[in-house]
Amino acid sequence: MVGWDTPFDESMLSRGEVIIYCPDGDVVEELFEILRDHGITWYGEESMRYTFWDDQGSDTCYRVTRSGELKRGNTECYSDAMYDDHIKCQFYGIESADSEISDSDFETIISAGGVDKGGVTRVG
């Protein structure tokens, strides 16, 4: 699908109209948390508790207007030439901090013998 593989970044919300492709229903709540934090509201005053993801399923797109209103559609709709000037991206979910470890966990790993190149903790 051409044009939809650019990862979503929150800064896009302040750079103009953006269309966010969200093919994974498991991460749509994460996207809506970000949208709510930026003051985005549904066009027509629907509650932001409703994602309407099931309407389009894995073809779901959300369009954020310059005025901060949210509209919904699908990739076919938003592939129309009238949206060529919009930022188009895909929401992959919020990057987790799983790759970071606390100081105490680091000390535990080091005192146990460290971690080999494959990421496996060695003892002794």
Image (cartoon, rainbow, N blue to C red):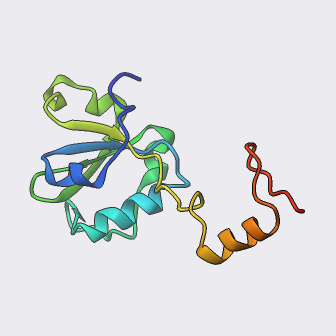
Q: Quadrant of the C terminus?
A: bottom right
Q: Name the side, left or right, on which 103 lies relative to 70.
A: right
Q: How many marks?
A: 0
Q: Quadrant of the N terminus?
A: top left
Q: Is residue 118 above or below residue 70?
A: above
Residue 52 at what x, y percent from top left?
41, 56
Residue 19 at what x, y percent from top left?
27, 42
**Residue that sits furthest to the right in the current view:** 124
Q: Is residue 19 above or below residue 5?
A: below
The answer to which quarter of the image holds residue 104 is bottom right
Using the image as rendered, state which of residue 62 and residue 17 is in the foreground. Answer: 17
The answer to which quarter of the image holds residue 78 is top left
For the point 45% across and 61% down, which residue is it? 30
Q: Name the side, left or right, on which 105 lies relative to 20.
A: right
Residue 9 at what x, y percent from top left?
31, 49
For the point 50% across and 40% down, which residue is it? 58
Using the image as rendered, state which of residue 60 and residue 19 is in the foreground. Answer: 19
**Residue that sits furthest to the bottom in the current view:** 104
Residue 96 at what x, y percent from top left?
53, 59
The answer to which quarter of the image holds residue 69 is bottom left
Q: Is residue 33 above or below residue 6?
A: below
For the point 32% across and 44% down, which residue is it? 20
For the point 34% across and 63% down, which residue is it? 34
